[in-house]
Amino acid sequence: VMDYNAYNLPLKGEGKTSIANTTLGAYDYWAVEYAYKPIATEQEAAELAKIAARSTEPQLAYGDDFDQGVGGPYDGFDPRTNQRDLGDDPLAYARKRLKLSQELWERVQTRKPEAGEDPLRARRSVFESFRQLGMTANNVSKYVGGMHAERVVPGVTPGQAFKPVDNAQQREALRFIAGGLLSSDSFKFKPEFLVTQSLDYNEWDRGLPMSIPDSVSALQGRVLDRLMSPNTARRLIEQSSYLPEAQRKSAVSLSEVYGTLQGAIFSELKTGAEIDRMRRSLQREYLRRLQAQLNRATNGATVYADAFSMARYHATQLSNELRAAAAKPGLSVETRAHLAETQDMLSSMLKATLVRS
C-alpha cells in the first residue's frame, strides 16, 4: 500500500526508535490475502466475502488521494486522512511537529559550523523544516469544519457515512492554530544566526538572504486558505444538519471560527501592543482573503449567502476596532501606517460589497 508517512523523529528527551517503517502493515497482509490466498473455485466467492468483511477493522482503515485532498471541491475534509502524518492522532502529531521544528531551529542556531562543510547546510535545514510544518498546518486545519467519512455499503457495513468532527477536537485544533501557528512567538530566530547564512554562489538562481517572515507568511497562508475557504464555510454552515437536535447548539459555528481567527490575528488592537513585521504580514494575508469573501463579483455561487453576511459582520467589527486602535497614543510610525492602510483597505472592501447588480 502506498503511504506518505512522516519520519518518526523523537523530541528532545524521547527514546530513539526506527525513523521509518521497516515491516509490512496489517493492511498489506490483508490485501495480499485477498489477492493471492489459494482458494478452491467452489469456495472462492464465500471466502473472498469473508476476507473483505474485515474492512471495518480499525487497522484496515483506508483513504485515497481524493480523501486526502486533490483541490477544488475535493479539498480533503477528513483529518484522519493525510500525507506526512504519523500516528492515529493528527492533532497530537501537529503539536509534536511544531516542537520538532522549534528544536531544530534552536540546534542550527547554536551549532558551530566546521571548516569544509556545506555552507548551505543550516539554510536547507530551516527551509525544509518550514516545508514539513506547512504540510502539518494544512492537516491540522482539516479538523475545523471537518467530517469523518466512511465507506458504508448498505446492508453490509453498518454505521454513518459522514459524521462531523467532534466539537472538542475542532476547538482544540482552532486553539492550536491561533496560539501556535499564527503566533510570532512560535518562530524565534537570532539576527546573529541570520547574518551568517550564505547563498549558493555556484548557481545562477542563487537565492536571496534568508527571510523568516516570508517563510512564516507562506506557512500561515496555508492555514488561512483552508479556514477561510468556501468549502470550509459550507461545511460549518451545514454540519448541524448532520447532528441530533440536542447537539446542534453546541456545534462549532462559522461565526466562532471567523471570530477566533480574527481575534488571534488582530490581538494587538485590544492590547495596544506594537505590530511587528510578521504580524503585519499575517494581517494583510487575512485581509486579502477577506476581500475575496466580500467580493460579490468574483465569489459568485461559491460562497453561501450566510458565509458572505458573516464575513461582512466580522469585517465591520474589525473596522471599528481598527479605528479605536489607531487613536491610541505612543505607537510607532510603522504601526500607525499599517493601521491606517488596513482601515482604508477595509473601508473600501465594505463599500464595494454594497454594490448591487
Image (tube, rainbow, N blue to C red):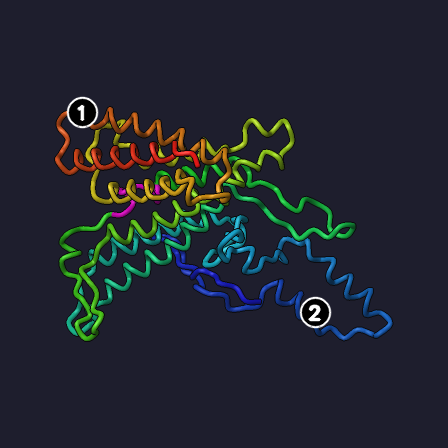
Image point (48%, 34%), residue name: 254
Image point (54%, 32%), residue name: 251
From the viewer's side, name the closer residue of 72 and 80. Answer: 72
Point out the frontmost of discs 2 and 1.
1
Does 285 appear above or below 117?
above
Give how far apart the Cα atoms at labels 2 and 1 are: 70 Å
Which region is colored magenta?
180-187
In the rendered image, the quadrant that contains the N terminus is bottom right
Relative horizontal placement of residue 271, taking residue 71 as reference (left or right): left
Relative horizontal placement of residue 32, taking residue 319 as reference (left or right): right
Residue type at numbered disc 1? Lys
Can you tell which mark lies on residue 33? 2
Please state the horizontal and vertical placement of residue 348, each as a whole percent of the image.
30, 35
In the rendered image, the quadrant that contains the C terminus is top left
Please state the horizontal and vertical placement of residue 38, each as a whole percent of the image.
76, 75
Residue 65 included in the magenta stretch of the image: no
Please state the horizontal and vertical placement of residue 207, each as a whole percent of the image.
21, 65
Considering every residue shown, the one lying at the far front of the view is 357
Residue type at numbered disc 2? Glu
From the viewer's side, name the closer residue of 164 and 302. Answer: 302
The answer to whether residue 220 of the structure is visible from this angle is yes
Considering every residue shown, the one lying at the far right of the view is 42
Predominant SS of the magenta segment: helix
Please state the horizontal and vertical placement of residue 99, each as a whole percent of the image.
35, 49
Give the labeled residue for mark 1.
328
Mark 1 surroundings within 10 Å by alpha-carbon count, few (fewer than 14), some (14 through 19), many (20 or more): few
